[in-house]
Structures are given as C-alpha cells and as structure tokens.
Image: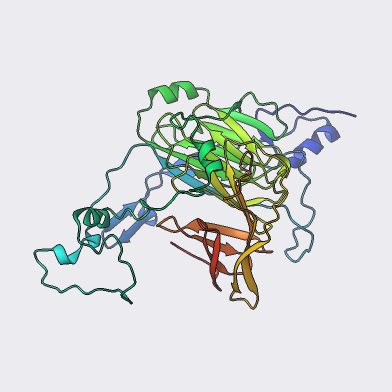
Amino acid sequence: MYSVLPPPPRYPTQNAYGATGANGMPAPMVETNNILSHPVGPGYQLLVGEGTYILRDDLHLATPPPHPSEAPITSTNPLATTPAPATSGVKLSLAALSLRRSSPQLYKLNASTSTRSNLQTYSIEESEKETRTSGDDGSEGAQQQSVNGDLSAKTPAFGEGNSSLAAANSKDNMKRRKPKNNIVKSNSSFISRVIAHDSLTKRLQERGSGGMFAFVNINRAFQWLDLSSNLKAEHMTKILFTKSHILCHDVNVLTKSFNHVDVIMGSSSADIIWYEPISQKYARINKHGVINPSPVSDIRWLPGSENLFLAAHMDGSLIVYDKEKEDVAFVPEETGLSTNESNDGAGGTSALHVNKSVNSKNQKANPIASWRLSNQKINAFAFSPDSRHLAVVCEDGTLRIIDYLNEQYEKSLSITSYEW
C-alpha cells in the first residue's frame, strides 16, 4: 500500500497522526511559531563594571515536532545501550553584513617606539640561528602589522603548491557562484517542507545593505532570521527536513554580503547542505554518505577560503570538501601515512592517519583531503587565530593539536574543553 502525506499547514504532534484514523476526528495541531517578548524588571538586568545591560528582546525559537515518519523513541532510559539517533542542541550563527571599522588595538603597540617609554628592549631569541619574526626588525610595515594584529596575512592557503588544486580554483575566480537547485521547489524526499515568508521578496528589497542575519538549527529545522527587521520573530525562511537533524552549520565570512551568503550545514544522516538563502538555492554534498556515512558533528569553512570547508564526522574522521565539486565513492588512497604518533594523555597513543592528502593529484572530485584522527567521536574543533593549527576535542576528553596545513599531528592534552 502506498500513501502520501501532504505538507500540513501546521505541524501536528506525532501521536495526533495515529489518533486521526482511530476516532475519525481532525488531528489537533500545535503551533510552532517564534515568540518575541520584551520583558522588563530588575530580573532582566545585568550589572557589571562598565554599566548595566538591559534585556531588550527575548526571542523564543520554535522547536519542531518529529516528522511522522520518524520512529518514536520507545525508551528514555539513560542507561539503555541501544544506539540513539544523533542529536544536537540549538546552534546559532550571526552574520553582520556591514563592514565594521576595526577598533584600535593599543595593547599591541610596540613599546620600544613609544615616546613615553624609556624601557630597554631585549631579544627573545634562544639561539643565534633562530630567525626573528617580522615584528622584530622595527620596520614601519612590521609595526603596522603588529598594530593591526593581522597574524594570518602570511599564512599559506590550504593545498598551496598543489597544481591540481590551483588549476581547479583559478577557473572563474572572480565569479561568485551559487548552488544550482531551488530549495523552495525541491521535490527531494530529504526535505520535508520549506516555508518562506509571504513577503520575503519585499523584505529583501526594502532592507538596507547592512544589518544582521541569524541562522539557527533546531532539531530537524533550520531558520533564517533578520534581526535588523521589525519582524525579527518571523523567519525569512524555515527549512524542515524529513528525518535528518541539522547538527551544525557555519557562515562563510569571506563571501558574505548583502546579496550573497554561503551557509554550510552538517546533518545526522551525514548529508551536507550548501545553502545560499538570498537566491534560495542549495546543493547536497556527501549525499547518502557516499564519502563518509557517519553524522557530521561540527563543520567550519577553512579560513580564507571561498570553497573549502572542514567537516568532523562522528567516526573520528576529519574531511575537507569543496562546495563546488561532485562526490564520488571514496576509497582511501594507499598512502599508509600516519604522522607523529604520540601519547594522547589518556593512556593510549594518537596519530593522524592520512587517507587522502591535500597534495594528492586526484582532485577532480570530493574529498580534497581525508584524515582519521580517532576511533572516538569528534565533538568540536576550532582554528587557531593565525589559521595554521587546528584544535580538536574528542569524546574521550582529549584535545589534539594538528598542523592541518602540513597534515601533521602535534600533541594531545587530557582536557574536556578548549578556547582559542
């Protein structure tokens, strides 16, 4: 028997679907709209040294109910050993569209050039063979770089020197590309429903070139909000996925503008979505887990890259994808390379096993690079301020430092959190 459930105008509870046929009555509906309030009172004020912060807007985001086709959770026993589906809490990203003037970083000034300082400066070189950094030579350009704090200006691009990657990236380099598929008109079973605001086109035309967008993933829903609008509680677009939960997402700060925003999402089904909200276009990467079938626990654009992003899969893999390349079934290349095996701080050893190197000449399709870091789930990762290193936190409570530009494992620390 075949049956089709049309997208409901409102979202019913899961039990309501079964109750509909049982008693012949219409299924009760549950509204799932965002709620904006403006609370007042001393309980909504925060007094700190520089003054008092007052809560202006309190926006409660709607949590969608499970899709009717999702299997109900039969046991809530926290000690149960049955594998539970991958889930995540609410994750929010803000995208400021106007360029903000950088504030003066006085704490980075070179004290040796100050007219109010008579302090002597000493070299911190440990040996005569050690080269000095660009800020030690006293040149005007080096001082300016120190003031601006632009540490990543001289960081090489990921894969620099690989002619296969350079040839692919140089094609139409000045053209801002968008995904090919219209998400509103999509007939994919992966997407349950796309709810665009009735006045979306008008809202986009009337808004200025500045402002701030917010992107939020909540279970199987992904919302795009305009926080600079008077209708900030009303989503610009809400995407509801069928069974897959969006676990993480990231906005490309390099390509964002008032008429283009690149968003990447990682899901519990291992599918990755490249979404451009202004044009309502999307592309599906790692479809059906063709490259890696494990859920995506964290995802981020590579610093300074328009196309490349790094995804952490729950099987302990780190994979670099290109948003514009096609996917093919991935077979690890026979490199047999494991870099810098060392103690992981938890009684074992750790290494970075390179399944595919960024220096590989086979760069016609995804993945660009694939590394196996652990047999444990990767919880989160972050790039260092100089964009040269990667900090990765695994389920076993270890923090691992990787020189990802050179695909080198460096060290492990037995801790449970990190901040860079």
Vertical placement of 41 versus 352: above or below?
above
- The residue closer to the viewer here, 391 or 140, is 140
**Would you say 315 lies left or right of 164 here?**
right
Residue 305: give x, y in percent of width and height: 47, 43
- The residue closer to the viewer here, 73 or 326, is 326
Quadrant, the N terminus: top right
Residue 187: give x, y in percent of width and height: 70, 26
Residue 61 visible from this viewpoint: no
- The residue closer to the viewer here, 33 or 27, is 33
Residue 181: give x, y in percent of width and height: 61, 27
Quadrant, the C terminus: bottom left
Residue farthest toward the right in the current orientation of the protein: 1
Count of numbered circles in the view = 0
Residue 350 occupies which quadrant of the picture?
Answer: bottom right
Vertical placement of 41 versus 256: above or below?
below
Vertical placement of 392 versus 15: above or below?
below
Residue 37 visible from this viewpoint: yes
**Would you say 148 lies left or right of 404 here?**
left
**Would you say 214 lies left or right of 376 here?**
left
Residue occupying the point 57% across, 50% down? 358
- The residue closer to the viewer here, 110 or 98, is 110
Colour option used:
rainbow
**Would you say 192 lies left or right of 95 here?**
right
Residue 29 occupies which quadrant of the picture?
Answer: top right
Residue occupying the point 73% across, 26% down? 6
Vertical placement of 397 versus 362: above or below?
below
Residue occupying the point 27% across, 63% down? 49
